[in-house]
Amino acid sequence: MSRFLCTVSGLQRFAAVIDFSDDWWDSASGYVAHNYVSTRLWVFGESENAWVVRTEVQPSWSDGAAYFEHHGNDPNGQTGEISVETFFQGQTNSWYQGWVWTDAQAYGNSGPFGFGASSIKFNASVPWMLFT
């Protein structure tokens, strides 16, 4: 989380650099599997007492496998550094909080006729955040 005092009303920018690595797969044999990762930039306005912007950014994905499919970037995965940004209307002399966060979900089911399995390995760090 990063805080910012807006000194001039108008369009403001919240940006971050995200260093990440991921390795994911989903596989199904007679059933289904799904995995999902969403990375977000959110800004909370203290004067507004509300989120003033909620933006989905990369790295993000949503994938599903059914019946006899296998998807993913396993075994090597992906590693990278990405710059992301969002914009919001700021108010003079108001404080804002910038948040960078990720949500992940993995799902698989099985039964007497097969299986569905899913795996996510996700690591990230945010070396810097910036308000302008």
Image (cartoon, helix red, strand yellow):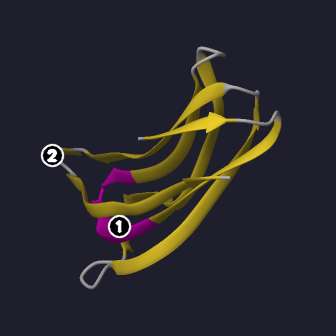
State left or right for residue 67 relative to residue 29.
right
Can you tell which quarter of the image residue 50 is in? top right
- Which residue type carries mark 2? Pro
Q: Mark 1 or mark 2: which comes first in sequence?
A: 1
Q: Is residue 86 left or right of residue 46?
A: right
What residue do we see at 66% from left, 25% from top? Answer: 94
Question: Residue drawn 68% across and 35% down?
Answer: 6
Q: Secondary structure at mark 1?
A: loop
Q: Relative to the observer, which residue lies in front, 127 or 32?
A: 127
**Residue sitting farthest toward the right:** 10
Residue 28 magenta: yes
Circle 2 SS class: loop
Circle 1 Cα neighbour tier, 10 Å, few/some/many (<14 / 14–19 / ≥20)? some
Most prominent secondary structure in the magenta stretch?
A: strand
Rendered image: mark on residue 118: none
Q: Is residue 115 magenta?
A: no
Say which of 91 and 23 sits in front: 91
Say what amino acid the circle numbered 1 marks: Phe
Side of 44 relative to 13 (left or right): left
Tell me the CA gap for discs 1 and 2.
15 Å
Residues at discs 1 and 2 in contact (Cβ within 8 Å): no
Question: Residue 93, relative to residue 31: is it above or below?
Answer: above
Rendered location of residue 82, percent (x, y) = 51, 72
* Quadrant that contains the N terminus: top left
Above or below residue 91? Residue 70 is below
**Residues in magenta, as a range:** 18-35
Pick the residue in front: 129 or 69. Answer: 129
Mark drawn on residue 68: 1
The tag on residue 112 is 2
Q: Residues within 10 Å of mark 2 (few under 14, many from 20)?
A: few
